[in-house]
Image (cartoon, rainbow, N blue to C red):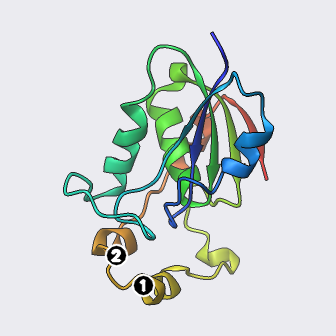
Amino acid sequence: MARRLFFLPGVGGNPNFWRPLGDLLPPDWDKTYFGWPGLGANPPDPAVNAYYDLVGLVEAKLGDEPVDMLAQSMGGAIGLTVALRHPENVRRLVLAVTAGGMDISAMGAADWRPDYRREFPQVADWVIDQRLDVSNQLHDIHHQTLLI
């Protein structure tokens, strides 16, 4: 079977974020580009009301063959959550500019939420208010992982 790749965008939710990279990879690889309903310019989905609903969207596409996950920013937290919940279904992780579901405010990171709310005032409150925190589970990630 061809290599399977899942591309997870950040909070912008744009399924085309990773396409320039995907287009450079072999055409016979199976590529799935996720977009996040209700985030960025994507229309909302009444079934998506929490970050764990986004995790569920990824989990629903896992299938039986392991995937390589390429995730940007908030997508990294979703990718790590999926890898922790289904370690046998994730082969590798590529995490780009992500805090991976950790509170990094103590390290001087800027809070993106106020700017995001101004840019997308229609965004659901859960996007701003909820936090995925997998920091206490990172020791359980045994997948080959590339941090960019």
Residue 92 picture location, percent across and down: 68, 30
**Farthest top residue in view:** 1
Q: Is residue 135 visible?
A: no
Q: In the drawing, does residue 108 fall left or right of residue 53? A: right
Q: Are marks 2 and 1 in contact (CB under 8 Å)?
A: yes
Residue 117 circle label: 1
For the residue carrying disc 1, how many other residues have a C-alpha within 10 Å: few (<14), some (14-19), or many (20+)?
Answer: some
For the residue carrying disc 2, how many other residues have a C-alpha within 10 Å: few (<14), some (14-19), or many (20+)?
Answer: some
Question: Quick check: 76 above or below 125?
Answer: above
The type of residue carrying mark 2 is Val
Residue 117 picture location, percent across and down: 42, 84
Choose the circle earlier in sequence order: 2 or 1.
1
The residue nearer to you, when weighing 129 against 10, is 10
Q: What residue sits 69% from the left and 21% below the top?
A: 28
Q: What residue sits 34% from the left and 49% below the top?
A: 52
Q: What residue sits 44% from the left and 32% below the top?
A: 85
Question: Quick check: 110 above or below 14?
Answer: below
**How many numbered discs, if any?**
2
Residue 123 circle label: 2
Query: Please, what secondary structure does the residue beneath circle 2 have?
Result: loop
Measure the alpha-carbon separation of dots 2 and 1: 7 Å
